[in-house]
Amino acid sequence: MTAQADVKRYELLIGGEAVPPGGGAYSSIIDPSTETPIASVAQGTAADVDRAVQAARAALKPWNAIRASERGRILMRFAELMRTHQDEIAAVESLDAGKPISGVRRQDVPAAIDTLAYYAGWCDKINGQVVPARPDALTYTVREPVGVVAAIVPWNFPLMIGMWKIAPALACGCTLVVKPAELTPLSALMLGRLALEAGVPPGVLNIVTGKGSVVGDALVAHPGVDKVTFTGSPSVGRGILQGAAVNFKRVTLELGGKSANVIFADANLDQAARAAASGIFFNAGQVCSGGSRVLVQRAVYDEVVERLAQRAKAVTLGDPAQKETSMGPLISAKQMQSVLDYVDIGKREGASVVSGGRRWGERGYFVEPTVFANVEHEMRISQEEIFGPVVSVIPFDDEADAVRIANGTLYSLAAGVWSADIGRVHRMASALKAGTVWVNTYGYTDVRLPWGGSGDSGFGREHGDVAIENFTEPKSVWVSLAQ
Ligand code: NAD
């Protein structure tokens, strides 16, 4: 894509400076709701990545020379600056990613600020231990920063997921090169500038925009990068894991999902259907933990299908900047086509569309909220991640049947259970293969609770104290006490 003359141009952020890309190329960023260019963003090269990694390496020493409590104050100032600029950040994120502004204000921005403030509090609490190994030695551990971190971020929650990586890495004394998704780089660039304003030293947080196959690849291959934290698709994740082997980089992978939301006949069906609908239609279904499979006990199957169809029809599609809009477009023409292709696949497989199923409007990448009934577990629409507003409603007979279906995909990121039976919900929470299980609710995340999955959903966890382990290396120290 070529740069547009009439939109703002954004450079790379390396070593605290706005730097033009080595190759001189810029790409147009498109508003997915209108298909018009909104910005022109630098396309980084492998040489730019090298410069950014060197800047990050050089910044490790000054960043760790700052007292931990002061580092915490700097990060808290960064969080306060985000709060001061929250309207601007929300507007940029909404425009760039096509997210309804009300949702960005309610969720993405507050969650990103909360994440930063939470890890600001960790800075001076990253302790080692004195371990009494033997009487003639003082033996203790310290936790040291992993080093330079490459953070590779997807387009569905650019700000929030970006911060899930940036905040704990900074708290642990690491420095970063962040690669935002090519389609949604604007909020990361804002964060880079705010961090500098807050007092984060130049070079600690570098932002290199551009293609995954160029910038992402170069980061993964770079010997100066110590850790890669990645959120994105399983196929790219697999390549990253292989590429990171070159210098045995540490890797955390948050990949896809095909989460099951299991509704038993004794559940509060009104609440369950409402949460199941928002669990898949929120962010136009572009959510790794979206409840894309709703499993319903046979006795209430028709009723739940009907309730879901009604809720799908009540979704307000439209301009993400309007506060009454509840669902925006998909991120790109390619993503829209992929979702529509899945609708065709579902129909050919014999499932029935009871609501939606088509493109909405002629401008923007909108797809109607779509409910598929009569879905069988083996169908592709029940097994593969669609990453759009499409839900497969699957009947089941009893608990064992529900567990078999829910656990019967390659993914295991999240799951939901709806039932009034307290014993059953605990049995299900134990039996479901998932990193997170929601009971009589769906979709919440909080930085204090571990987040991640296994299998094709990746490995490792973000959030909480687990993330502190992700970004530090323990060191054991032996001091002889022998006379
Ligand atoms: P993607 O894998 O295409 O891209 C993710 C990031 O990787 C982008 O920044 C991209 O530019 C970069 N990238 C692409 N090719 C690369 C390469 N060869 N080397 C290094 N980096 C490369 O994913 P996406 O389409 O942006 O996001 C959607 C996917 O992300 C879905 O599968 C979704 O389930 C997953 N996701 C998972 C979580 C989670 O927490 N588990 C959260 C959000 C999204």
Image: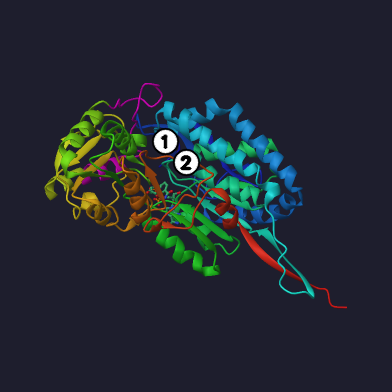
Inter-mark Cα distance, 1 to 2: 8 Å
Question: 318 or 480, which is in the foreground?
Answer: 480
Amino acid on which disc 1 is placed: Ala
Amino acid on which disc 2 is placed: Pro
- Can you say which quadrant of the picture contains the C terminus? bottom right
Answer whether residue 335 is magenta in the image: yes
Task: State the mark number for residue 97.
Answer: 1
- Crowding at mark 1 (Cα within 10 Å: few <14, some 14-19, many 20+): many
Task: State the mark number for residue 248.
Answer: none
Q: Secondary structure at mark 2?
A: helix
- Crowding at mark 2 (Cα within 10 Å: few <14, some 14-19, many 20+): many
Answer whether residue 292 is magenta in the image: no
The residue sitting at 57% across, 46% down in the picture is: 166
How far across and how far down the image is residue 469, in percent? 59, 57
How far across and how far down the image is residue 240, in percent? 45, 61
Q: Principal SS element in the magenta part?
A: loop
The answer to whether residue 86 shows anywhere in this view is: yes
Provide the residue span drawn in magenta: 315-342
Q: Are marks 1 and 2 in contact (CB under 8 Å)?
A: yes
Please name the residue that numbered disc 2 is placed on: 158
Quadrant hosting residue 58: bottom right
The residue sitting at 42% across, 62% down in the picture is: 239
Q: Is residue 335 left or right of residue 172?
A: left
